Image (cartoon, coloured by chain):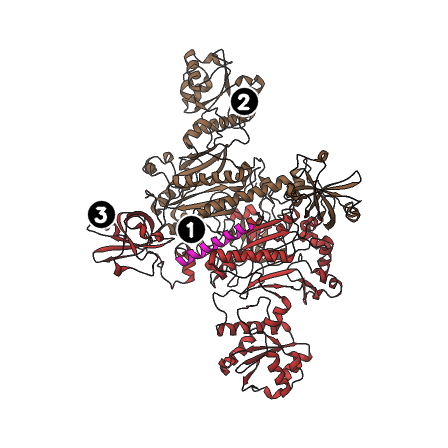
Chain colours: A red, B brown
Amino acid sequence: MIRVEQQRTHFCGEICDPSLVSKRVTLTGWVQNYRDHGGLMFIDLRDRSGLVQLVFDPQTNPAAHEIAKKARHEDVLSVSGIVQNRDPENVNPKMKTGAYEVKIDRIDFLNRSKTPPFQIDQEDVSEEIRLKYRYLDIRRPAMYNNLFMRHRITQTVRRFLDEHGFLEVETPILNRSTPEGARDFLVPSRLSHGKFYALPQSPQIFKQLLMVGGLERYYQIARCFRDEDLRADRQPEFTQIDIEMSFVRQEDVMRLMEQMIARVLEENYDIKISLPIAQITYQEAMEKYGIDRPDLRFGMELVDVTDVVRDSDFAVFKTVAEKGGMIKCLPVPEGDRLSRKDLDDLIAFVGKYGAKGMAWMRVKDGKLESNIVKYFSDSIQQKLLEVTGARENYTLLFVGDVKKKVVYDSMANLRLHLGDRFGLRKKGELKFVWVVDFPLFEWNEEENRYDAVHHPFTAPKLEDMALLETDPLKVRSDAYDLVLNGIELGGGSIRIHDMELQAKIFELLKISREEAREKFGFLLEALEFGAPPHGGLAFGLDRMVMEFQGLSNIRDVIAFPKTQKGTDMMCDSPSEVTPKQLEELGIKVVEYRANK
Amino acid sequence: MIRVEQQRTHFCGEICDPSLVSKRVTLTGWVQNYRDHGGLMFIDLRDRSGLVQLVFDPQTNPAAHEIAKKARHEDVLSVSGIVQNRDPENVNPKMKTGAYEVKIDRIDFLNRSKTPPFQIDQEDVSEEIRLKYRYLDIRRPAMYNNLFMRHRITQTVRRFLDEHGFLEVETPILNRSTPEGARDFLVPSRLSHGKFYALPQSPQIFKQLLMVGGLERYYQIARCFRDEDLRADRQPEFTQIDIEMSFVRQEDVMRLMEQMIARVLEENYDIKISLPIAQITYQEAMEKYGIDRPDLRFGMELVDVTDVVRDSDFAVFKTVAEKGGMIKCLPVPEGDRLSRKDLDDLIAFVGKYGAKGMAWMRVKDGKLESNIVKYFSDSIQQKLLEVTGARENYTLLFVGDVKKKVVYDSMANLRLHLGDRFGLRKKGELKFVWVVDFPLFEWNEEENRYDAVHHPFTAPKLEDMALLETDPLKVRSDAYDLVLNGIELGGGSIRIHDMELQAKIFELLKISREEAREKFGFLLEALEFGAPPHGGLAFGLDRMVMEFQGLSNIRDVIAFPKTQKGTDMMCDSPSEVTPKQLEELGIKVVEYRANK
């Protein structure tokens, strides 16, 4: 085994400075490429900083040249030599170090490599292979850069929060299971057979306890766990920037957090965003965009036309309107680019979101045209043009349904779909918005009770307090989400710090006193011992890095991610364990009747 | 519910500046104490920064005074008023804010508190109550300070490592179980019934994979898990500062890490330590102190007297020497302070470590005295005085045994015991030492094979490589521990980066090729694709903070620790879960035959 004998003097990527010419440098790294050319050997040596060209001349350094001839892809080298300018015709302007090369007189192999399953500068590698050989995948500059930027973003966040008096506190990973929200990962206890820890879905309760404990400002870059069936952008374990503050109002949290985001962008991407970030109410977001995380990089706002078309002769709309449903219109500028075939495809598209159909009209010569126009009187047509602001060559798309959710879902997705199609969702453009005034409750049809929209500790707005008694669905909460380009970066709320109010909320959620005590006992007790007003927020770090890096695959910002089946391709986990391990834990693997 | 209406202008502890006198301040915090005195109401208001005295005058502000009368311990207040100097006779020099008070004209209760189970400034609170009401416990300034200093230490570490080009990378918590080392916590997989994840005992393999991946410098403040029966200073989950570097030698890692420790002490405790930190070989540590983590705050070095007493007439020593055993002497300065009763107690003390007895001699008037002196010739006595350096009033304590481990254990503990007793282990004195040149292997009698002293990836010293073939127990490793005052703060090693050597080591550990592939498959494969030379180290963060804070209970530096039974007193975890949860995981709680 060969050890490091001489420390490197420079990183490969640093050989880009005229003052280094004629100086001796020692480098270490990996063989990216090698070639024999004009009697000389050339090796492109790579370390995490970049590439540099090494040259071996058999005339002046025959020993080094002889060794260099053995170099193959991904061998690990230690080399020493003199920096020189490349011949003008060999300068490579695409490389940072492309004007220089190092003439090597000493070379040692620190390790050899088998032929790798893919080359580091190869682009068409399947994700399966990349995950299996993750240790080679992260040699690729793009992957290294993702991890590097993730590090830098995290450091900025920590520095910012440290400067603002936040304490980083570690909360337990071995937690108590609460049958609320998503499914818990469980950990059997060996010392107490039959009992289990749960991995935290978030440090929510602990961060509130820290506020009760007078810590005042807490943060943690916290690992969280959800045992859910995985979607493309979900991982069973994920990381959130978790924050909680005492003696604050909603505005205080939002103002500080947007400063933090601005700092992250400025320090790491040299992007300045203007503060404060715009706000939109939940209600307005739903009406204009059909979704509570609108992509504001483009317009195409939805228009409610229920009242306009109520008196038309178009039976579908009439029925929907009569039954208390909703009809929305999406006015598409330059909608004449949509062919009949396109429109048929869009009808199929909204069908995926439950819409039973989609009507359309075109604006031609100032008039509406389509096969259904005849059902709309001139005055209704005129009114439609007015309320939608439609102009020449617009196409109006309509979806109506008795269930408002169907209209929101299909229209929101239709809007995004057309935004993509018309190139309106520009990469590199960052449109932030705070969504505020979320409703506190939603109605749970199945269980005939209210559900908390965020979580049961979210505070109602002071001015809506009376509505708790009369019309709970109208109560707005002190909750807020930060949305970027249609992606929820994070969200939070002011919490209830008053035990009486908390009891009232549990009552509305039909959580009995016993149940509440069983689930949240220690938090409820804590609220009785002088809990300060407090609130906070959590950002999804993985998603934040992904968005800022302009990526679409969340696995690209995680060093060792899991697949959608929750497996680790490299480690081959989860795996079987020994009978002794199970015996010590007092558990047994069993086949229940098929229940899925 | 009352919300925060006015933002505080100052922390309580900041009211200690003459320039604030006559200025209006708004404060928030908890009622630490309240009293009616001379017609005025006084409240000591506490936030995380400290205490300040509020005064309520019924003459000038009757409304505020009326409200203040209702204040009880741990109520949460928002107050506003004018800072004034205290009357000279009321100045409290023990309080940072003791020269000032705030005359309040506006007071709001932000929350009320039930009577707390203990008062925040109370000292005689049982740990059980403290853990159950942890949210009250961390209101105590001492506990807050521990969490604050832990935060600061962590920040210093991060800044230092960031400056030195380390990337913080998160490695998975849902891991693969490896039946090596301590017992794993397991997590049943719902998506693959019968398979399990394991929580990581350390990120060892992942950090090595990151080095193979060319990341070059990695760190993580990493949560680690061991399902062991807990000792006083062990927690089932603990945190380590985990570090790995490429293209380095042992010295490079040690030099950088001691700079980091020095920075932590300088920035947070204003303590300067001189670098480089001293080194001692494992062999020397064992010979002089009987232990591989010596407390160097005091001398009292052990002396091997086997050869000196071999030819005495003292049968016990003769037999031990003949059988190849070892006799060690601990020379105790001022040993005349040990009474006969004390010596009897010490005999019982070493018995706990397996010693069958302890002999002793006193130095009186330049001569040795004891009931066994007669078995030692004059020349042996003279020699004993010489080799032990014993002078007047020394007491020499002897333990001999055929098993060297018994001698080391009993003498190491005896030395520490006497160090405590004679007040030689001074609080506040910091004696660091690097222990180096650990043996690579130890012999496993039961299984008739070698065991790795650190772990199977530790590199042997280059100069001892030949001994791998001839005398493996003599092979020293490139492993190093940093020891402070007899406590191991952390340790690490240079790793094997060469597959052939790794295979050789597995052979000596009698780990078959199949077994190795099963256990470490992906790491072994990774070593074949151009692994660079690399090494690293891990510090126990909990222990480090505990030592630097001068504490003896590791739970005092953890926000929400577990008891020695692995339970959380506050959350009452682990807990039972629902049958549905177990069914989804495909496991069942069973009673195995009693196996413990």
Chain of the residue under the numbered disc 2 shown in the image: B
Q: Quadrant of the C terminus of chain B?
A: top right
**Pointers 2 and 3 in contact (C-beta within 8 Å):** no
* Depicted A541 relative to depicted A405: above or below: above
Query: In x, y percent, where is residue A188?
Result: 58, 49
The residue that mark 2 highlights is B347
Q: Which mark is residue B210?
A: 1
**Residue at position x 48%, y 25% from top?**
B299
Of residues A379 and B139, the one nearer the viewer is A379
Q: Quadrant of the N terminus of chain B?
A: bottom right
* Residue A145 painted magenta: yes
Q: Residues within 10 Å of mark 1 (few under 14, many from 20)?
A: many
| Mark in front: 2 vs 3 | 3
The residue that mark 3 highlights is A63
Q: Amino acid at mark 2?
A: Ile
Q: Give a yes or no on whether discs 2 and 3 share a subunit.
A: no
| Mark in front: 3 vs 1 | 3
- SS at mark 3? helix
Q: Earlier in the sequence, mark 1 or mark 2?
A: 1
Q: Amino acid at mark 1?
A: Leu
Relative side of B31 to B454, left or right: right
Query: In x, y percent, where is residue B286?
Result: 44, 29
